[in-house]
Amino acid sequence: MAEESIIISVPKDMPVKRPREGEEVPVVLEDVNEKDAEYSISSVIPGWFSEISPMWPGEAHSLKVEKVLFQGKSDYQNVMVFQSSTYGKVLVLDGVIQLTERDECAYQEMITHLPLCSIPNPKKVLVIGGGDGGVLREVARHPTVEQIDICEIDKMVVDVSKQFFPDVAVGYEDPRVNLHIGDGVAFLKAVPEGTYDAVIVDSSDPIGPAQELFEKPFFQSVAKALRPGGVVCTQAESIWLHMHIIEDIVANCRHIFKGSVNYAWTTVPTYPSGVIGFMLCSTEGTAVDFKHPVNPIDDSKSDRPLKFYNSEIHEAAFCLPSFAKKVIEGKAK
Amino acid sequence: MAEESIIISVPKDMPVKRPREGEEVPVVLEDVNEKDAEYSISSVIPGWFSEISPMWPGEAHSLKVEKVLFQGKSDYQNVMVFQSSTYGKVLVLDGVIQLTERDECAYQEMITHLPLCSIPNPKKVLVIGGGDGGVLREVARHPTVEQIDICEIDKMVVDVSKQFFPDVAVGYEDPRVNLHIGDGVAFLKAVPEGTYDAVIVDSSDPIGPAQELFEKPFFQSVAKALRPGGVVCTQAESIWLHMHIIEDIVANCRHIFKGSVNYAWTTVPTYPSGVIGFMLCSTEGTAVDFKHPVNPIDDSKSDRPLKFYNSEIHEAAFCLPSFAKKVIEGKAK
């Protein structure tokens, strides 16, 4: 196709990431400082943050940036925080939106209460990942919980969250929380058998530091760390985008978790395709019927009432569109 | 903020729409042919289609464009069809995505079967809007239906759909379909009282030609055109973006529909925020319990089985997150 040049204006303090090798990004950027560009906004709309990834080729979601508040490179990933025009503050890891103040409630409440409301009296809970603290905030709503362990690999995520997302990182203030900075895979291996009532795996996508959290050996460690009839909930991608990944995760889980294996999903506008899923499994022991929660939350006296989760939306989360049902539940036969 | 200029390359055959007055678009485009620019791709990422609207400020969803297949201006709106990289062909009206081949199933199946599966033996159905034919395709699955009237204001939408979206426009091939090109508001006023079992309002957003379809007089005409205990389903925006619009629609509907008034929602990745909602109301008469479908579809012998809808997802669609429940169902008290 014939091409012509167009001048666009880009704020000086907003560097633009160059595409990685093999990544298709249609904008040719000139005159950008190479060093700055490497670790910063993967923006194809100047003044906007655009999320482009080989995980969801051909589409991009963009948020208008008011101000970049933090940019850093940890030992594991690029970490960025910006103030958006209409979604509040936004946390980005390796160019992928992890949370926005406007819609984080949906993800945090669902990944936490889907498992914890499915068992009576959860006492010991382990969170893998989730360094922003939002899952901790939600676990802390459960009065029966006595111990909340969290293992996050990247201290920068914890520090940045405490600095910029106080309403999320508030989870760390609960006295039941024990923070471990380290590799979740190694942490789990060292856990005595049958320790936890519930494990929540709040990971990023299976490209980058979270890769192992989608593999079989990891699920085996989780199963071992759970008491009989204990439950796990792991972030499990989008039915619209990653059916092949989900199919693999479901197959792995059916192999390892001898209680029940279920897929649930919810809406998160700033995640690719607008939805995110969860694998909910239980180990052999007292049967767990995830679709009918037995441990509802009473937030009537809370000064931070639930924004998203309720018992009806819990049950609804397990109802799948036909195209997904065929793949996910077909495996059960 | 200090600004610097950057050269980007734009394919010559891809004109770029200038922002309307009052519309915030951060990219300053130079050297674009004014005339071309007015009626074409509202693209801020060259080579991509970006959906930017005052209806959802501060965010944009973009699809990579392989080829623009059609661009025209009807008496009512700008009409565009492009081949995207990963969502199939895409229909755009006034810069807003109406459907993509990849995810149209969710919208068409839900807006149709939520009302039609909620009443026994629907016979006469009216579709307002829906010129692409997808709703007709879904209505035609119901063997009890004898008459399907459709009133679409814009003939160009019908023609373009027949040319570029044969799997959607296939709905027009059903012999029960009667197409009327004209204003839905005027059409409804002329309908004899109590004519239809169901009315489906498949409109675009309340900015542009569809504006009146969100106002009280229109709902009054719908109620009049329905038999006692008849049902209506109208497109009703996103709980994440347009709670104030939804609140108004709900209030209008409660005033007019004396049977039941309900809000349901579903996922559509290429709609802003990834979800779209529906108002489901019935007129005074035999009670309709939308949440428990009485008229399931048997598609076991269909050569086009349902991709999205099933009875479980029907019931789940009425379960709302707490923040939406408070506004929508709070009104019922």
Image (spheres, coloured by chain):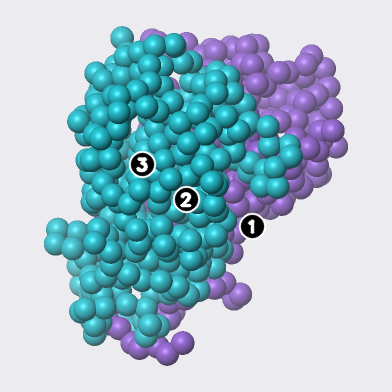
Chain colours: A cyan, B purple
What's the amino acid at mark 2?
Gly
Disc 2 marks which residue?
A: A133
Residue B127: image location, x then y, percent: 61, 33
Does residue A247 show up? no
Q: Quadrant of residue B209?
A: bottom right
Alpha-carbon neighbours of circle 1 within 10 Å: few (<14), some, or many (≥20)?
A: few
Q: Nearer the viewer, residue A264 or B283?
A: A264
Q: Is residue B159 left or right of residue A76?
A: right
Q: Which residue is mark 1?
A: B207
Q: Is residue A125 visible?
A: yes
Residue at left offset 71%, top offset 31% = B262
- In this view, which residue lies farthest toward the left? A21
What is the chain letter for disc 1?
B
The amino acid beneath tag 1 is: Ile
B249 shown above or below B7: above
- Residue that appears at 28% across and 40% down: A187
